[in-house]
Structures are given as structure tokens and as C-alpha cells.
Image (cartoon, rainbow, N blue to C red):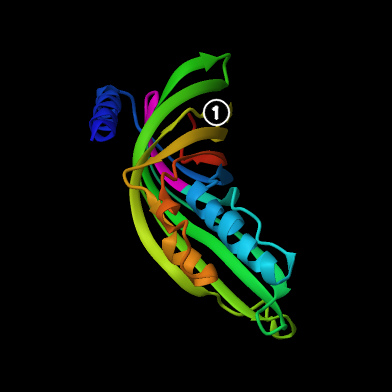
Amino acid sequence: MKRFFLVTLVCLGALTTVLAQRNRPNFSIQLGYGTRFFNPAPLNLAIDSVYNVQAAALGLDQGLSEVKWTPGFFGAVALHRGRASFRASYSTFGASSFALGIDSVGLDYRRDLAVRGQLVTVSLTSELIPIGDYVTFCVGTGFNAMRLQTATAQVAASAFDPEAELQIVSDEWKPGFLVQAPFRVHIPPIFAISLEPYYQVFFSPGDFTGVSRAISGPSSLDGRLKGDIDHFGINAALIVYLRPR
């Protein structure tokens, strides 16, 4: 609750900044690529300390790798007024891994696991510090909703089809907010390059009990498969203004 009130105050302050600007507004389209150090501790516990340990007892040639970096594409539209901007953005992310081993009847198998999703964000950003004529340091915050999906499948190694869809285990939307500190390099008259580190916070923890049971069955560690999934990320975007700045 404290997080909610803090971010609400910051957003109201930023909105006041936008409305206080008197010069003519501008608009932009923004496209780019980003990655996040998602590194969900509960899911990685399910992968490394539950699945890989159990599978190794039967025979494991290659274990599942932990989920850490999850890259994806980024797109946005923005309204600019003075030093402030209001932006609506959409981004994707994902990571996958696979294991090779021998099952309980002695057959070679392949286990695939994927974590993927989308993020919809509405944010307010202000150009805080100009650095020379063309570079600005910005700060901002925003609310968002992340769709988090996990999927898995196990097949005989000889029957593996790279085009086959994995079975979805969980699919949920998680609300949250982020704080960001973009650096923007302006290329007159209508372009800019934006490098945007941010920190993402969610209002509720992630629960990976379902995916753990799908790949390993019930475990004594099930009670530890729910926890925070807050993380750091960075986007790089090309900004195209609809009129010269």
C-alpha cells in the first residue's frame, strides 16, 4: 500500500508538470529492443533444486538452465509538452531452455520450458538535467500490467518437433509500477536515441508451484515456490518526433 501511494504522488506531480507547460505539444513514435534481469528466484529454485536434482537421479545429460535475462521488443507512442512526456508502451519478453535425459523406463527424452509475456505501461517522464545541447537525463515512473506465461512439454528425443507448441501451465496478469532514468541523445530535427534503465516492482508475488509440479511433481520445496519477482531492466529505443523539436 505504501508503494501505491508513493507512486501515485509521483505521477500526480509529473502530471502537474505536463499540464503546466505552455508551449506547443509534440508527439512521437518509439521503437526498440530491451532486456530484463528477470531472474525469478522461486522459478529458478524449481528448476535447479527440484527438477535437475530429481532428473539427475535417473540420468541427465543436460539440465534445464535457470531463467535470468529475458529480452524482447519495445514499442510506444508519446505526447511531449515542454520537458515532460506522457507515454503508452508495449513490450514483449521471453526465455526458454531444454533438458536431455533418460526417463524411468530408460528412454531418451527432451524437456522444454518457456517463460514469456507482454507488458503494457503508461508512464510520465521529465527531462531533468540537460547535458550539453543534445543530451538529457530524465526521470519518470509509471503503472503497468505484465502478462506472465509459463509453458512446458516433454517428448521422446527422437520425436522432438521444434515447431510444436508447448503446453501452457500458467497465464496471469500482474499489476505493478516502474521507476526509470532514461538518457536521451537528440539528433535534430526529429530523431532521438533513448537508453532507459528501469526497476520494475509488482504488487503481488509470483507463484511457480504449478510449473514446478508440471515438470517434477509435488516436492517438499513447494512452499518456497512463491516470492517476489521485482527486477531490473533496460530498453534502447529510437524516437521519431512528428514535428521538429
Which kind of residue does numbered mark 1 sit on? Arg
Q: Residue at x 56, y 52 (%)?
A: 44
Task: Provide the residue designation for mark 1.
Answer: 184
Q: Residue at x 48, y 65 (%)?
A: 211
Q: Residue at x 37, y 48 (%)?
A: 205
Instruction: Provide residue 107's location: percent of width, then percent of height.
Output: 72, 83
The answer to whether 4 is drawn above or below residue 97 in the figure is above
Q: Name the residue nearer the viewer: 61 or 138.
A: 61
- Magenta residues, as a range? 76-85
Q: Few, some or many C-alpha atoms within 10 Å of disc 1 (few <14, some 14-19, many ≥20)?
A: many
Above or below 156: residue 199 = above
Q: In the picture shown, does residue 142 fall above or below 23?
A: below
| Residue 16 among magenta residues | no
- The answer to which quarter of the image holds residue 208 is bottom left
Locate residue 120 relative to residue 35 in the image: left or right. left
Across and down, in percent, residue 7 comes to: 29, 31
Residue 145 shows in this picture: yes
Most foreground residue, 107 or 231? 107
Residue 124 visible in the shown view:
no
What kind of secondary structure does the magenta stretch mostly adopt? strand
Please state the total of marks drawn on the protein image.
1
Q: Is residue 236 left or right of residue 21?
A: right
Q: Position of residue 90 (x, y in %)?
A: 44, 51
The secondary element bearing badge 1 is classed as strand
Quarter of the image where the N terminus is located:
top left
